[in-house]
Amino acid sequence: MPSPPPDAPPGSVAALRARYGERYRWLLLVALMVGVMASIMSSTVVNVAIPGLSHQFALGQERAQWVTSGFMVASTVSMLVTPWLLARYGYRATYAGCMWLLLAGGLLGGLAQTFELVLLARVVEGLAAGVVQPIPAIVIMRAFEPHEQGRASGLFGMGVVLAPAVGPSIGGLLVDAFGWRSIFFMVAPFCAVSLWLAHRYVPTTAPGGAMANRDESLDWVGLAVGTLGTLSLLNGLVALRRGPPAEALGLLVLALACGAGFVLWQKRRMAAGQAPLMNLRLYAWRPFAMGALVALIYGTALFGSTYLLPVYMQMGLGLSAASVGAILLPSGLVLAVVIPLAARLADRMPARGLVSTGLSLLALSFAAMVTMQLGGSLWWLMGLTIVGRVGLGFILPSLNLGAMRGLDKALISQASSAINFVRMLGGAAGVSLCGIALEWRLAAHGTSLTDGAYPAARLAAFDEVFLMLAALCALAMLAARGLGTHGRLT
C-alpha cells in the first residue's frame, strides 16, 4: 500500500487513498450513498404520513400539501449552495453538517406539537437534502476514470432508487404500528450510519483535493433572488389551479423577472471576478446546455407522472390503494436491476443514444396508457409501468455523464449543482403542471375527480394528460441529440 505524501494533511484525499488503496473510491461512494438514500427517503416517505398529519392538526388539502412542497422548494434552492459549501468547508464538514441537519429535522418533526414546527422540520430536511444530492456526481466525475464512471453511477443509482421503492412500504408499516411521528424518526439510523462512514471515508479537503478556502464568500444576493423566483414560480402554478387569475399572473411575472435578474447578477459577479452562485460559462458548453434542458423536461415528466399515476389508478381506473402499491412495486424493483446494467453500457456507448432510448421508452409507456380501459388487464398496466421504469434506468446513469464529460474539472461542482437544480425545478413545476392539465381536461369533458358519473370521460381526461407527458419526452429527445456533440454554443 503506498505511503501518503509527507505533506498530506490527515483526512485529505491523498492520505485516505494511501490508507485504503484503490478501493477507497468505492468506499467513499458507498459512504455518500447512505446519506443520499436518507435524504431521498425523507422526501418520499412522508407522503404516507400526510393523512395522519391532516387529522392531527385539522389541515385542509392546501396546508397539508406544503409538507411536501416546503421540502421541495428548500431542496431545490439549497442545491445552488453546494459548490460554495464544498469550497469553503470541504467534503467532510459539508456532508456531515447535512447529516446532522437532516437528523435534527427528523427529530423536530417527530416531536413537533404544532403544524408550524412540522413544516419547519420539513424545510430543514429539504435544505440538507438539497446540498448533499449533487455531491456524489462531483465525486464520480473527479475520482473515477472515464471508463469507470458509468459503473460508479450505476452502483450509486441502484442504491438511491431502492430508497423511494422500499421506503413508502416500510413507512406504511411504521404508520400503522406507531403513528405518523415514526416517519420522521425513520431517518435517524441512516443519519447515524452516514456520520460514522463520513468520519472514516469522506475527505476533509475541497473538490480536487485542495484545502478548503475559509475566505470564500457566498453570493447572498443571487441566493435571495433565486429563492424568491423559485417560490414565485411554484406558487404561481398553484394559483393557476386554485387562486385568482390576477394573483397567478403576478406571481409568474415576478418569477420571470427574478430569473432575468438572477442571470444579470451572475454575469455582473463574473465580470467583477467574484465567484457566482451559478457559473453561466457552463451553458456555453453545448453538451451541458442540452443536458440541462433534458434534465428540466425529464424532471417535469418524471415528478409529474409520479403524482399522476397513483391518482389515475385510483380515480380513473377505480383501483384500491393496495392494488396500486402491488402494481407499482415490481417496476421499482426492475428499475434497481436495470440501472447497473445500463450504467455498464454508459462506459462504452455515447450518452446520447442511451438517454434517447430511455426517453423513447418513457414516452411509449405514457402514450400506451390510452389503451387502458375500465376493467382492463392489470398485467398490461403493470407492464406499461415497467417499460417506463426501464426507460428511467437508461436515463439516470447517462444524463449527468453526457452533460459533464469534457467540462473543465474546476466547473464540475457547479455543473452537478446546476443540473440537479434544473431537474428539481422541473420536477416541482411538473406536479403543478399535471394538476393544471388534468383539471383543465376534466372540465372540458364535463366531469371531475369527485364526480361519480361519467367514468369514461374522466379516463379520457387522464389519457390526454399522459399524451402531454409523452410529448414532453419527445421534446427532450430532440435536446438529447446534443449530448454527443462538442463545442461551444453560438
Image (tube, rainbow, N blue to C red):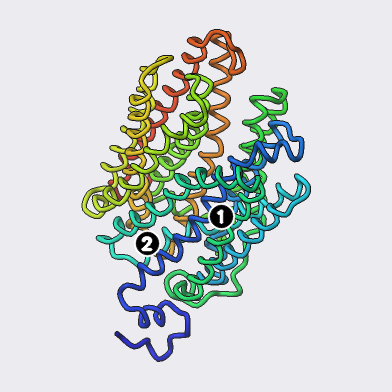
**Closest to the observer: 163 or 175?**
175
Callout 2 secondary element: helix
What is the distance, in whole Å, between disc 1 and disc 2 at their CAs? 18 Å
Tell me: 369 left or right of 440. Answer: left
In the picture, the disc for residue 129 is 1
Expressed as whole percent of the image width and height from the top left, the position of residue 27 reads 38, 69
Expressed as whole percent of the image width and height from the top left, the position of residue 393 reads 34, 43
Q: Residues within 10 Å of mark 1 (few under 14, many from 20)?
A: many
**Closest to the observer: 186 or 243?**
186
In the picture, the disc for residue 140 is 2
User: Furthest residue to the bottom?
Assistant: 6
Residue drawn where x is 36% and y is 61% of the image = 141
Tell me: 123 left or right of 278. Answer: right
Where 409 sits versus 458, above or below? below
Residue drawn where x is 47% and y is 61% of the image = 34
Where 384 sits versus 440, above or below? below
Expressed as whole percent of the image width and height from the top left, the position of residue 348 reads 21, 53
